[in-house]
Image (cartoon, grey):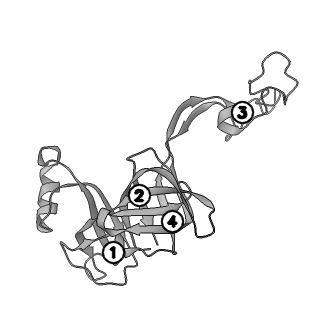
Amino acid sequence: MSGLIGKKIGMTSIFDENGKNIPCTVIEAGPCIVTQVRTNETDGYDAVQLGFDDKADKNATKAELGHFKKAGTAAKRQVIEFKGFEEEYKLGDTITVEHFTEGEFVDVSGVSKGKGFQGVVKRHGFGGVGQATHGQHNRLRAPGSIGAASYPARVFKGMRMAGRMGGDKVKVENLRVLKVVPEKNLLVVKGCVPGHKNAYVTIQK
């Protein structure tokens, strides 16, 4: 799936032609530089490696500097490979947000917001107050029973318990592209995408 690397700007809403208010997310998509071209002859598969968002040379390793120097560009913060480009790209080419068109559907991947250590009510949707389960009478948000008796005398793997929540790789599929703004490298998609503001995301066709 071909695509671009982007940065989540934030959410807003726009009105469609029928006057309906549609929630949407604004993404700064590209411009991305082709930093390496994978071929079936040399690498065993065909792909295009893209770099996005410059970083200072002092924050890059010598290996990174040498790698990006071949493409004639500055060191990049994000480097991701994409497959399925219909066009032929060579080292140093620039791919902009115009790779997408209004009305098509895209998949957006990112790392969800970290929530820290959370209890079972927030993490797994347990009943809590008003829907108290497991016969508990004075512990309104407790998990209740977690194991069996003397046999098997252990807690099964996958038991829903309290723990760290968020910070997972999440893909939201089939988001419609509402607007493309080439002069500002902006892509407006319907709905929400994972991650906090300024988080890096991957947009795939």
The first of marks 3 and 1 along the sequence is 1
Pointer 1 and pointer 2: residues touching (CB < 8 Å)? no
Q: Which residue is mark 3?
A: 155
Name the mark nearer the viewer: 3 or 1.
1
Crowding at dot 1, Cα within 10 Å, few <14 / some 14-19 / many 20+, comes out as some
Q: Which residue is mark 2?
A: 27
Residue 166, image x, y percentages: 53, 40
Pointer 2 and pointer 3: residues touching (CB < 8 Å)? no
Q: Give amino acid for label 1.
A: Ala
Query: Could you say which is closer to the camera, residue 37 or residue 97?
Result: 97
Q: Which residue is mark 4?
A: 107
Name the mark nearer the viewer: 4 or 2.
2
Residue, far right: 135
The first of marks 2 and 3 along the sequence is 2
Rounded to the nearest angstrom, the CA distance separating label 3 from label 4 is 37 Å
Q: Secondary structure beneath disc 3?
A: loop
Instruction: Locate the N terminus and report the quarter of the image it occupies.
Output: bottom left
Q: Give amino acid for label 2.
A: Ile
